Amino acid sequence: MVECWLPYGETEVHVSIPLRDLLGVVEPKIGEVIRDVETAVREAAESPINCESLSDMAEASTISIGVDGSLPQKTAVSALSGLLEVIEEKRGLGGVSITIGLGLRTRGINRLLKLFRESLPRGVEIRGHIAKSEVEELGKTRRGTIVRVSKTLLEGEVRILVGEFHPDPLAGFKGPHTTILPQLSGFEAIEADRRLYHQGSTGLGVVEDNPILRDSWEALRLTGVDASLLLVTDHRGGVIDLLYGEAEAVWGKALTEYRDLYSVEVEPADTYILSPGGGRFDFDLYHSLWALRILRKPKKGERIILVAECREGLGVQGLSKLAGVEKLSELKRRYMLGGDILHLMRSLQRSAEICLVSMLPNHLVEPLGLEAYRAVNDAFEAVGRGRVLVLPYALSIIPRGG
């Protein structure tokens, strides 16, 4: 037997697989990470791409920094510390505020903000933004999304974003655009943007003709951002490179240099055991289920075991309200947030059986047509068979083959 470990919340769980059945454990092969992120940020901020240096921008009376709250907290704190040091040396920290964009998250917000406040200078105001926070309307995208962005971010004379370059199951890759939409946007804007899932090509690493990617970039342009710090992250949240400068310039450079970094071969298998990648991805079921995008078109009879803690519950009301809808056309017609991921799941369930290993109670999971288990080994013993492929970081890889 081979013991395979998968991220599960802030810990790991294991599954025992017969050696003869194990095809492999699929992870991206990414190199060394930057050890001193804080110093690297200081250096990058003074050698920007297509914009003023941070020390020049720091002359503004107020500075708002918007942060993608899905970044690993330790990484985000190191990056912010580097930016704040440059600003403090130039003009002190008065008038500097930080808004942590948490998007659709609704639980554990105070705990997260407390950790940021304990780790950063006391003179800086640190606030959180969730989808129900106060927003300001900025206009409409060509695809009809009414852009409503965090009011606290918009208060700054200078606006700086801190985000990451990493595969995204909807926008293709994360970046400054996803820091704005969804992380720092209002609920209605997020829901309208996600509706575009039905209107074009989206998915992990999908950039060309991606309507969600284009929509979020339009939202960023309407926001009026002066600079972006972009952290190129690996599957464990380590920083392998960072870029500071004009938003589209830094993202374009990262895309050119790193888009193939996450590409891996995903072999056909009879049973797939996958994890979204741990706590920053599997905090609720809505976000965890997007890990299924790693599997394109499973064959009849294949089994999928999704390992996701889901400590914060289902995530969006649409999962429960639309749970009884089986027809794909009806999910599209009755769209609400959550219908997008149900559409994906129902598509896969036409040929594959999906099981969930989670702390969610059965009464929440069973209406979705998912078999629920508490331990990976129990799920594997119940449904596992044939050739087995393990994907511990499904939301950090771009599938090739399969």
Image: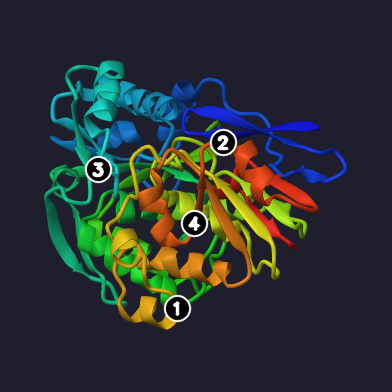
- The residue that label 3 is drawn on is 106
Marks 4/2: CA distance? 15 Å
> Which amino acid type is marked by label 1?
Leu
Image spot of residue 350 (x, y percent): 58, 72
- Vertical placement of residue 271 versus 25, above or below: below
Residue contact at pointers 3 and 1, CB within 8 angstroms: no
Q: Earlier in the sequence, mark 4 or mark 2?
A: 4
> Which amino acid type is marked by label 3?
Thr
* Numbered tag placed on residue 375 in the rendering: 2
Q: What residue is shown at x 83% (from left), y 46% (from top)?
A: 21
Marks 3/2: CA distance? 26 Å
Name the side, left or right, on which 323 lies relative to 91.
Answer: right
Image spot of residue 245 (x, y percent): 41, 45
Image spot of residue 300 (x, y percent): 69, 70
SS under mark 1: helix
Q: Earlier in the sequence, mark 3 or mark 1?
A: 3
Instruction: Place residue 329 in its image quadrant.
Output: bottom left
Which label lies toward us, 1 or 4?
Answer: 4
Residue 18 can be seen, yes or no: yes
Which label lies toward us, 3 or 2?
Answer: 2
- Vertical placement of residue 380 versus 54, above or below: below
* Numbered tag placed on residue 370 in the rendering: 4
- Vertical placement of residue 97 versus 137, above or below: above
Q: What residue is shown at x 61% (from left), y 44% (from top)?
A: 379
